Amino acid sequence: MSGHSTYRPQSKFMQWLEKRLPIGGLVHSSFVAYPTPRNLNYWWTFGGILAFMLAVQIVTGIVLAMHYTPQADMAFNSVESIMRDVNYGWLIRYVHANGASMFFLAAYIHLFRGMYYGSYKEPREVLWILGVILLLLMIATGFMGYVLVWGQMSFWAATVITNLFSAIPGVGSTIVTWLWGGYAVGNPTLNRFFSLHYLLPFVIAGVVVLHIWALHVVGQNNPAGIEPKSDRDTVPFTPYATIKDTFMIVVFCIVFAWFVFYIPNYLLHPDNYIPANPAQTPPEIVPEWYYLPFYAILRSIPNKLLGVCALFASIVILAFLPWLDTSPVRSARYRPLYRQFFWLFVATAIGLGYLGSRPPEGVYVVISRILTVYYFAFFLIILPLLGIFEKTRPLPNSIADSVLGKA
Amino acid sequence: MTTVSSAEPTRRDFLYIATGAVGAIGAAATLVPLLAQMNPDASTVAAGAPVDIDLAPIAEGQIVKVFWRSKPIFIFHRTKKEIDEAKNVDVNSLPDPESDAERTKPGHEQWLVVIGICTHLGCIPLAHQGEYGGWFCPCHGSQYDTAGRIRKGPAPRNLALPPYTFLSDTKIRIGEESAKTA
């Protein structure tokens, strides 16, 4: 991890430790002396917020696992006993359930910030791809956690999502039986989902370390999208970034607490308070809000295999963004056309989210199809062509110049 | 460390290849139990034995739902009208062409026995709903006719047929296929 380390331990103990395990120097160069661009705005604080949310989910999750029973006949009741009997169980479960939503909210803001300012471009491709891997891991973890409640939505979400794999020609049904450990979703499925739901957050934590490592090798992007050239362009991580990140974590926590204490069930589905019933599919199956755009893409395509392919493609395509965007200019500030297409893309993602929550009929299907076409066209047609045809605005000479108005 | 290059294969080359080969085979063999443990276990397989169902209480026009291997099985006692509707369809116009005779047992064509799982994404369709008098799936709108054939919506195939056999005119065994000569 870069940064000119001037770390000299004060205490005798730290001097002794530093000669044997230079951990103090690592922390100092990564989170104290580490130079950050001086023009970072508040959109850059969501990385810190995400690290905080991961910690919240792991701590509350470990506590919940102490009271939860991963057995098909007892799982639902054990969740209800957490809500009613366990001391502060209601609070811990509501923090965990709403924490998942807040985690995804922060991740999507972080992702859109990266897209707006071109943070995926050379030399940050690996950093970006690690981020896409983190998103995929979050999606898998969130899904399996939702199943553990073992309500009606849990059970049927598990059925629908595992059945996506039945679309694979030839071996589909063999794979699905293998995933279930039975002839349908049942106790073996619940058990393995519990095991994996406990494991994956630590895998996420491991990939986060790689993500931060890659970040500290190439350095942060910034709103101007140009590399720092001199010490005038940067400020030390501590105190500047530390206080900014901490401030936003606290602001974020206020929003989080508002959900937890005032509308804890706003983002949950009432059907998930009905115990899982393998004999009865609920009248409508709706995933959690953070999966809705992808669900809308799945439903907009009338062919099963193609629908499933489009669902996976809509996430995996993000990993190819560094090569699909051919423009040498990073920041949307200096890309007037890209900026418009970007905001249209954000509106499309939100629109697909809304359509994913509507029944798949009539005008909703037509609009879903139009938005799905734009979603993919943005990556596959617009971005490659913009690099050729867009007339970008002149870049500032340096970050300091852009801040001090000498562009 | 120094590298010794030599044209002749050395004992170290032999050890390297032999260790690699044994290690690779060992790793592959280890994968077998690690993957196989996820398949249905012995008790699940044992619980999947055939079940006998008495058809006598099922009234004409009624659809009952029984379970075999944790899967819902629909047993549909079809009326004359419903059988005719299923037969009077141009088979080649169907998304998954199958005649009514292929979906029932000869001599027992008033009985339709299908696995009650939508072939789209696994929801349980609702009986006696939709435009074709059969089933309607509430999840993504697939519609099935009185022979359990897909007529409309995203499902790719007809409702699957479980293996079953008629023990008598009013009794079937689900989980065991009758001889083709029946």
Image (spheres, coloured by chain):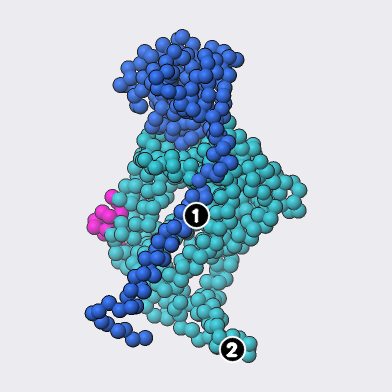
Q: Quadrant of residue B158?
A: top left
Decide: is A261 above or below B87. Answer: below
Q: Position of residue A398 (x, y in %)?
A: 36, 74
Chain A takes which shade in the image?
A: cyan
CA gap between label 1 and label 2 equals: 47 Å
User: What residue is at 55 percent from the left and 72 percent from the top?
Assistant: A242
Which residue is more in the foreground, A335 or A275? Answer: A275
Picture quadrant of residue A295: top left
Chief secondary structure of the magenta span?
helix
Residue A91 in view (yes/no): no
Identify the residue shown where x is 46% and y is 68%. A210
Where does residue A55 sit, x and y in percent of width and height?
59, 62
Give, as a three-letter code, the residue at label 2.
Answer: Gln
Q: Is residue B14 left or right of residue B179?
A: left
Is residue B134 covered in magenta? no
**B132 is higher (above) or lower (below) than A284:** above
The residue drawn where x is 44% and y is 57% is: B29
Query: Residue A15 bears which disc, if any?
Result: 2
Q: Secondary structure at mark 2?
A: helix
Q: Which element type, helix, strand or loop, lies under badge 1?
A: helix
* Residue A57: assigned label: none
Q: Tell me if residue B78 can be seen.
A: yes
For discs 1 and 2, the disc positioned in front in the rendered view: 1
- How packed is label 1: few (under 14 Cα within 10 Å), some, or many (20 or more)? few
Q: Which residues are magenta?
A: A381-393
Give the position of the N terminus of chain B as an image quadrant: bottom left
Q: Is residue A13 above or below residue A154?
A: below
The letter of the blue chain is: B
On the image, numbered disc 1 is attached to which residue? B34
Q: Is residue A293 left or right of residue A48?
A: left
Under mark 1, the amino acid is: Leu
